[in-house]
Image (tube, rainbow, N blue to C red):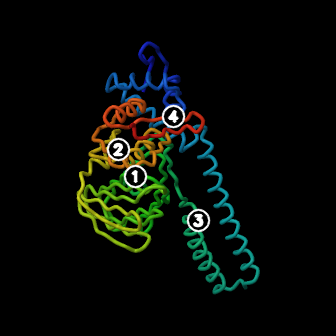
Amino acid sequence: MKLSLYKVTNIEMDYSQLKNHIKLFLKGRLSKKDEIKLLNWIKKSPDNRKHFLDIQHSLCAEMIYRPDGSTEKSRHKLLKQIEYEATKKIFTSVFKRYLLLTASLAAAFFIGFFIAKFLDTSETKLQEQTSTLQKICTPPGARTQFQLPDNSTVWLNSGSKLEFPSHFGEVRNVLLNGEAFFEVTEDEASFIVSSVFGNVEVKGTSFNVRAYHDDLFETTLVEGKVEVTTEKGDKVILLPGYQSVYKDNQLTDFKVDTELFTSWTSGKLIFNKEYLPRMAKRLEQWYNVKIEVDNDKRLETIFYTATIEMESFSEVLNLLKVTAPVSYSWNAKSRIIKLYYEK
């Protein structure tokens, strides 16, 4: 992709400057003035928005694999060392046995049989060792999309981590900390999403799992069928359009509008009568900020219906303020936004 100059309100930037602005934006370090300019530029045209998403995706990839190729070099070096150690053990063992055995035909046959079995076992062990655990992480405020070894597609939300083997065996098991949407390819092997709260098991389906360590355990099914099992052993089978929630050691399920819980994969948040404390939790993950809701029971009764796509965080704060008796304060030292009831 060849990109030249980008007009951001009254200024122009080349590709490297734009990339640097987006990198700072994703890390939450871009100045408020430059953030407003960048967001205004993004909203000017669909092409600008596409360029932004393309650069964001490449930046996420750079954070996963170092651009200097050192990660790949290190991996190859490790595999070569494993192969060398395995080969050295094979020939050492064979040589010792050769010295101890006679040169008879039967002994020679035994040695040949032994080497063949040993090589087969060693190769199996080598494959197990080189089927390393892969880890994909998304920094706060960013999202990414990728494919698993079985060609299943994953969207990973802000501040989330997914771990999985480079080769799946009889069971396709992945470990999630955070939020992810899965489109699982159909296969005889079960697909299991594990988390600290429990497991979600499927065969082939589309579903969203939210399992941040400091939040509730939520599974939303779009297509197919899934079985949710908590760490206590409680189970529920979900059908399309249903959601399960594990909170306060209780597992419940009910019908929902799935778009409300999967819209983040297309770059927007949709709220439908969302109560302020829950909305604040989703906003702080989306914008990579820390939000505290004042301990005032009246705030728990305030809810919002809104769609947030490319709005800046300052615009969202103003939305909260003008549509309900809510105000906010900013602590520059702790970098925390505090929401409180405006009397």
> In the structure shown, which secondary structural element does the residue marked by tag 1 occupy?
strand
Label whose residue precedes the other's in the sequence (3 or 4) = 3
Q: Gap in Å between the C-alphas at discs 3 and 1?
A: 32 Å
Q: Amino acid at mark 1?
A: Ala
Q: Earlier in the sequence, mark 1 or mark 2?
A: 1
- Comparing labels 4 and 2, the label whose residue is closer to the camera: 4
**Which numbered dot is residue 126?**
3
**Which one is in front, 234 or 148?**
234
Q: Name the one closer to the observer, 111 or 264.
A: 264
Distance Cα–Cα, label 3 vs label 2:
38 Å
Q: Secondary structure at mark 3?
A: helix
The mark that comes first in sequence, 3 or 2, is: 3
Q: Nearer the viewer, mark 3 or mark 4?
A: 4
Spatial separation of the CA atoms under disc 4 and disc 2: 29 Å
- Residue 247, image x, y percentages: 39, 63
Residue wearing tag 2? 265
Disc nearest the viewer among 3 and 2: 2
> Is residue 67 found left or right of 98 in the rendered image?
left
Q: Quadrant of the N terminus?
A: top left
Of callouts 4 and 2, which one flags the residue occurring earlier in the amino acid sequence? 2
Q: For residue 330, which numbered disc appears in the image?
A: 4
Q: Badge 1: few (under 14), some or many (20 or more) residues near its Cα, within 10 Å?
A: many
| Mark 1 vs mark 2, CA separation in Å | 9 Å
Q: Are marks 1 and 4 in contact (CB under 8 Å)?
A: no
Q: State the image coordinates of residue 263 (x, y, percent, origin top left).
A: 31, 44
Residue holding disc 1 = 180
Image quarter in which the C terminus is found: top left
Task: Give amino acid for label 4.
Answer: Trp
Quarter residue 150 falls in: bottom left
Check disc 2 and give the amino acid type: Thr
Q: Residue at left 59%, top 79%?
A: 113
